[in-house]
Amino acid sequence: MIRLGSMLPQAFMIGIIEMVNEAGPEKTAEWLTNIGKEMAKTQGPGLEGSPLDGLNYLPFCPFADELIRFIDIFGEHPEEFLKIVQYAKEREAEDKNKVECPAVATFICLLHNAYRKKRAKMAGYETIHLACKAIMPSAPTAYNEEAIKVAGITKEEVDNILQKGSCIFKFIKKE
Amino acid sequence: MDISEADKLYENCVKILKENQHPNGGFYASPPGTRYPFIYPRDHSICILGAISADLLKEAKHGLEFMLAAQKPSGEFSQRYDVDGNDTSYKDLQIDGNGLILYALNQYLKATGGLFYDSLADKAFCNQYWEAIEKAVEFILINKNNEVDLIHTINSIHEYPAYEHGFEIYANCTCCTGLFGAIEIGEALGKDVDEWKQQAQQIRLAILERLYSPRRRSFIKCIRVKYKSSEPIGYDAFASSVIDVDAVEYSPAHFGLIDEHDLRNVKTIKRIHEKLWDKELGGLNRYPELWNRNNGGYGPWCHFTCQLSNHYTAIGDQDMAEKYLWWVVEMAHDHMLPEHISTVERFEMWLEDYSNARILRDSKLTMIENVRSHPKWKEGFAYVTMPLIWPHAEFIRAYNNYKNKFIKR
């Protein structure tokens, strides 16, 4: 049940569905990325996550609960959400600089990665996003193979971290 | 009290404080390679106050520079930072950090001036950071609820929203004293701070009226309110109060908002001592056992024990001041202090509760290993997070107060 006092996150997700239908997944992906960057500016420089052997990870996705609530109410994987993920993957396939791309398990990864990346950039770090575990069991985990290579670890090691976490990334100090 | 033992602990506390300041200025909460190798504004501020008390004014200034430069664009100080001043927080708002930094800054200003405040105080430093001071004050004031004139927070000193989300006493006292500190700085610099004065007075009055229970003759922990802008707050989803005893209910006097002899404070201290002095181990617990949230088992905390000793020192009760401080001296291991002390039995009970509930995580597993491998384990003690820097700074402050009152005459 949606309570009035806590309906804004759900309303935001309805808005995303509307946006995909009105403007398409490309514009929506760009919009979500811009929101992440703008939010980052309000917070200043920062490095997210728990440090672990030169990487950082999040024990759980901070958006998972709201997303699961939404899916519980509106049905698993609204088509519009999948369209955004699909678009992000196609864009990554065409991108010459794949290491820079987010590992997108859900549409919200675009906003989150843009936020994390911008804050790290303000702190003087580049960010590479290695993997993100899908929130819904039926959806696949997203990997950025190039980023995993650059981080110097194997996919098995990434999977081991994902046993206790949901999202893995690495901050690289800019020279 | 064995003064020579206390002196040795004091000397080591000063050494530890110096050794745990990163070259960039931040005081680690615990040394690199241990549990909390980050800079937490709350711990860091107390370390600055410890440095001031130990006459380490250069170190105090460096600590202030570090934190003032790390302020977020909104004026907030985050839960924690890395050694380069990057926000690495993972918890929601803890607004007491804003109050503590302003308070520490004003204490630094006063210490640099001493008896010749007008001519010697480091006003140039405060002037350099005036914009950060203004932003820190504004951030506190945007979190003030206009119905009750109290500051809203999500976390406070125990980082525990279940009991601290709302108008919490430590957060309100630190913010209020921080505002008064900013006002004093502003006046020294010739700034117009009239509006801040009015706001600080409102908050002080609200603390004394709304966070005090005449029937219990004690300050209370918190008025739980979910949203800072709820008005009327009676309709807020959380609307309730936390009346459990908590060591930080001493905050109104500790931060100079009321006199130590004020009956409201004296009676509050009586309740704290009766309910939180550990009957088995001695020392002061931070809150009741049933909160069941002491990682590593219920037990007394060195820094809260030091804090409360200041009350007994201030009112001239040497026996009680000594009882509190001597406990800290006695419990030190190799002249170092842990976060808190528990017993093997309590540790195992805590471990069982947390294992059953499946709420142990990696950092706690490391802590468990460290507690079990500490030499005190064989004596039946669980020394948790050793050393934590904060209690060393508190001991410096409390012991200097004690010596100034009872020894240096």
Image: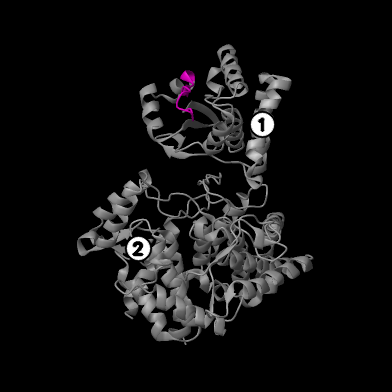
Q: Name above or below for residue B72 compared with residue B259.
A: above
Residue occupied by mark 1: A14
Residue occupied by mark 2: B298
Q: Amino acid at mark 1?
A: Ile
Q: Amino acid at mark 2?
A: Tyr
Q: Residues within 10 Å of mark 1 (few under 14, many from 20)?
A: some
| Spot occupied by residue A24 in the image (x, y as percentages of width and height) | 69, 19
The reply, left or right, for residue A70 in relation to residue B283 is right
Q: Chain of mark 2?
A: B
Furthest residue in direction top, as rendered: A94
* Residue drawn 65% across the image and 28% down it: A33
Q: Quadrant of residue A6?
A: top right
Quarter occupied by the C terminus of chain A: top right
Q: Chain of mark 1?
A: A
Q: Which residues are magenta?
A: A134-146
| Spot occupied by residue A69 in the image (x, y as percentages of width and height) | 55, 36
Badge 2 marks a residue whose secondary structure is: loop
User: Which colour style is shown?
Assistant: one colour
The reply, left or right, for residue B182 in relation to residue B389 is right
* Residue drawn 49% across the image and 50% down it: B23
Furthest residue in direction front, as rendered: A1
Is most of the magenta stretch helix, strand or loop?
loop
Residue situated in front as seen by the camera: B93 or B134: B93
* Residue drawn 54% across the image and 60% down it: B164
